[in-house]
Image: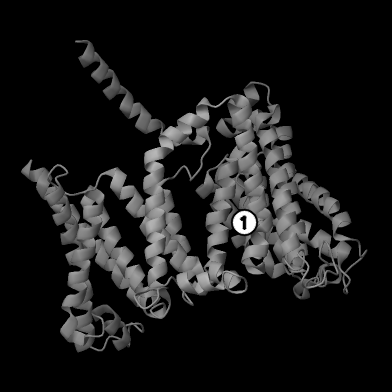
Amino acid sequence: MSDKTGHNWNTVVRMGLLGGVVAIYLCLAGLVGTFSNRAMITGVLSLGHTMLVLAGLGTGFLAARRAPGGGAQAQTVMAGALAGLILGGILSLFVIIGSVVNIRAVMLQASPELYGLLTFNLGIAGFWAPIVMGGALGAGASLLYTLPPAIRRPLTWGLGALLVLGLFGGYLRTPMLTGILSGLARFLFGPDGLTPIGAIITFVLFAGGAALWQQQGASTRQRIAELPDTSRRTLLISVIAAGLIVVLLLPQALGPFVAQVIAYVALYVLMGLGLNITLGFAGLLDLGFVAFFAVGAYTVGLLTSTAEYGIAQWPWWAAVPFAVVLAMLFGAFLGLPILGIRGDYLAIATLGFGEIIRILAGSDLMKPMLGGPRGILNIPKPIDGLAPGHPLAGPNQIYYIALILAVLVAFVATRLRNARLGRTWMAVREDEDVAEALGVNLVQTKLWAYMLGAAFAGLSGAVFAGLVGSIFASSMQLFVSINVVALLIVGGMGSIPGVILGAVFLIGLPELLREFSEFRYLIYGCALIAMMLRRPEGLLPSGIIRRELHAEAEDEAEPSDVSLSSSAAL
């Protein structure tokens, strides 16, 4: 028992050291200093300090989970406080060393302003401030961990709401200022984040709502389940209708920027659904998927552009079917030579194909046809010539078009998954040799996967051309393909709702966080690492993928279940 306890305390100390390293990194990477002027709660808490608060809370929470003492509350709180004190001690040591030794020549962010932020402008005499704050945050997080779920969950929801509205409150405040809600906007939101009163109201509303749902949620679900089929169907239709109304009014309420972000997300949903067929259903990793996106975009550009390289000046709607068909043909062109390749070799081959298309599109060889580095300009909107005040002016029309196409493609992908062809793809994904032995035509099955996936990517490229109004080879980077693969993995391979959720998290959130500029990809990478460690199957995985990734845990649980049932029988 003593060895176990000693081991647990060593783990708590390691958690504190790790938290201190994370906090130092946030300081030296410039995140704390850069965002110290960006308010989360006006006059109370800046975004820079919020990052350090989150580091302290996270350290205390992780330490509480590993606390010795069999889960006793006192031991758990002591573990969290100890980890927080270690984190704060590391920051205090950093302040003392930086105040005595000039380390700014090596670490540019180690400035007197940063030391002032860490000590609340008390200078080296306030070296104790990070220790006190670290211990308080660690103890608070561990105390929250020990609370019953009925209390912990509402508090967590309230704190999460403060974080989200503090970050994105500006997107709500700006459109509210132009209407009758301007007074409410100034009452709840400051120029950057929440006002103190707004923060209190937000916390109370979300925490209270979560507590109310926790009490009434189970009975509400039970009452809905007990409704007659007709009433339940009517309720479902009402919810869907309300959701459609919200979707239709969203760009008018939040402005063109949010509409453009959602349209951008919908484009990646289209590509993700295409790659979900190739990778999620058939198990064929394609790292050159951006090539089909480029084919669709350039086809629409060439057929619709009124500038130098336009060849037909068709309407956008007439060019889209040709873009989809041509992308399908390119999918067949790629698929035929590499059908016999498997695994990592297939990924490398498709990567090479994508790079060939990108380089050719920007080369002098194809400049007479595709414009080379100059690209294709003056691509008309799907509905052109609208006045600035029209509801479909600007990116709004692409918002509606992209959403409609995403819903249509999701429906087609669902039907394909449940059809005979979808089951054949999944058989090939599980084991090609067994599938072939059972009579599956591998060439035909794989070729259909490539062609249909390429068609969806070509459709996405066609919509992108209408959204941006110009096409350049520099837009067809490998990073686009990597993004599509990442959203598929994060959302859950083989899961259509997972593709949508992955696009929201990996595409929508970074676009909304453009104020972080280069730091947003740092946060993006950290989120991906945490996601793969905590939920490798994705946010909304398909049942098959979930069972595959958790098969070992289930196998380990079965013997214990058997032994327990045997003991009960005895």
Whether 163 is drawn above or below 490: the answer is below
In the current view of this chain or complex, which residue is farthest to the left? 2
- Residue 231 appearing in the image: yes
Q: Splitting the image into 4 quarters, where does residue 248 fall?
A: bottom right
Image quarter in which the C terminus is found: top left
Whether 521 is drawn above or below 97: the answer is above
Q: Residues within 10 Å of mark 1 (few under 14, many from 20)?
A: many
x and y percent of residue 563 in the render? 24, 19
Q: Splitting the image into 4 quarters, where does residue 53 fall?
A: bottom left
In the current view of this chain or complex, which residue is farthest to the top? 570
**Is 228 on the left or on the right of 554, as rendered?**
right
What's the residue at 23%, 74% (across, down)? 91
The residue at which mark 1 appears reads as: 481
x and y percent of residue 502 in the render? 55, 51
- Residue 471 appearing in the image: no
What's the residue at 43%, 49% (across, down)? 532
**Is 168 on the left or on the right of 212, as rendered?**
right
Q: Splitting the image into 4 quarters, where does residue 175 fall?
A: bottom right
**Which amino acid type is shown beneath numbered disc 1?**
Ser
Between 569 and 42, which is closer to the camera in this rendering?
42
Between 154 and 67, which is closer to the camera in this rendering?
154
Number of numbered discs visible in the structure rendering: 1
x and y percent of residue 288 in the render? 65, 54
What's the residue at 71%, 60% (across, down)? 356
x and y percent of residue 430 in the render? 56, 31
Image quarter in which the N terminus is found: top left
**Is 308 on the left or on the right of 431, as rendered?**
right
What's the residue at 40%, 39% (across, down)? 216
Whether 193 is drawn above or below 159: the answer is below
Mark 1, secondary structure of its residue: helix
